[in-house]
Image (cartoon, grey):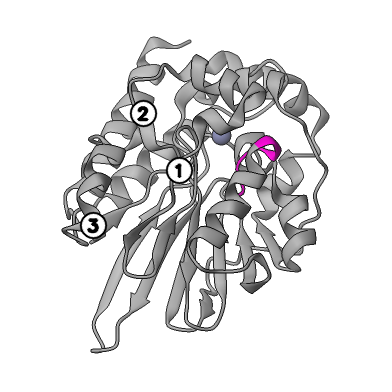
Amino acid sequence: MSAVSSSDVILATGDAPWKVAVTPFRVMDQIYYIGNVWVGAYLIDTGEGLILLDTMCAETTYLMVDAIYRLGYRPEQIRYILLSHAHIDHVGGAQMLKQLTGAKVFLSAEDDEFRHNEQALHAEAAMPADVFFRDYPYEVDCHYDDRKPIELGNVRIDTRLTPGHTPGVTTFLIHVRKEDGSEVTAAMHGGVGVLTMSDAYFAQAGIPSCLRDRFIADCEDMANLKVDVCLPSHPAHYPGDFFELSKSLHKDPDALVDYTAWRRFLTDRAAMARKLAEKKT
Ligand SMILES: [Zn+2]
């Protein structure tokens, strides 16, 4: 699956979404992968309802609904839909899933503004993903408050504004309390693609290029956090072969537990952004 080139995958997502389908699987404890080959999405069973991280493109919403049922859940059990950032490959299914589930939709205040900003939209329209996918308007119910974790059942999610890829990218630190009282942590950085961190893009979108410095600083800072499982918002960004590793999960449920993955991932992404800064694009 990972050998497919990203442009082929983007095209298939729009034209023949079934080709990018991934059989849903348990990543760790109560967290499941329900994304596709290209874009990540996660379902978290808190014991008192479900939380959904990201909604992928509208074209693949039906795959996500199918994945939820295949795991033995129902869409209406979803209480919160947490959006990582306002790019169409992560928010395209937001309105359909909100209507289907009745869940509250969260986005950062910064990206709620960004998604309505005419100049930014113009720059975004030139991005590959925006050319192919249906753009459904969606309503946001709540903005993140990084001082207030989102808590449900035995899960606590700390949010952190980590701009750069967009002005309002949100990173999720997901703490799962186990029956024996111990805690495991998974984390998803909301957006690390450097395509939208060039000087040319920032100028076109009217976004200050200092956000790239902030992105680098945040990556370096968060790399020190102890994270058991790194959840990629795009599987291709995982520092290793995410799907290949996941094949071992049926015999080793901890196959994706790797204390170095989060650090390696953030260090790599910071280096990519730094290279871009040095190029002065
Ligand atoms: Zn994005």
Sequence-first disc among 2 and 1: 2
Tag shown at residue 250 = 3
Task: Give me the residue at 50% from left, 15% from top.
Answer: 8
For label 1, the residue is 233
Region of the chain picked out in magenta, as a range: 55-59
For label 2, the residue is 1
Can residue 29 be seen by looking at this rendering? Answer: yes
The residue lying toward the viewer, choosing from 22 and 204, is 22
Judge the density around disc 2: few (<14), some (14-19), many (≥20) Cα neighbours within 10 Å.
some
Write down which quadrant ligand 1 falls in: top right
Nearer mark to the viewer, of 2 and 1:
2
Q: Is residue 41 left or right of residue 262?
A: right
Residue 21 is inside the magenta segment: no
- Report, in whole angstroms, how far the alpha carbon at label 3 lies from the one at label 1: 22 Å
Mark 3, secondary structure of its residue: helix
The residue type indicated by label 2 comes to Met
The residue type indicated by label 3 comes to His
Task: Give me the residue at 28% from left, 56% from top.
Answer: 229
Judge the density around disc 1: few (<14), some (14-19), many (≥20) Cα neighbours within 10 Å.
many
- Report, in whole angstroms, how far the alpha carbon at label 2 lies from the one at label 1: 16 Å
Task: Give me the residue at 45% from left, 43% from top.
Answer: 233
Residue 57 is inside the magenta segment: yes
Nearer mark to the viewer, of 3 and 1:
3
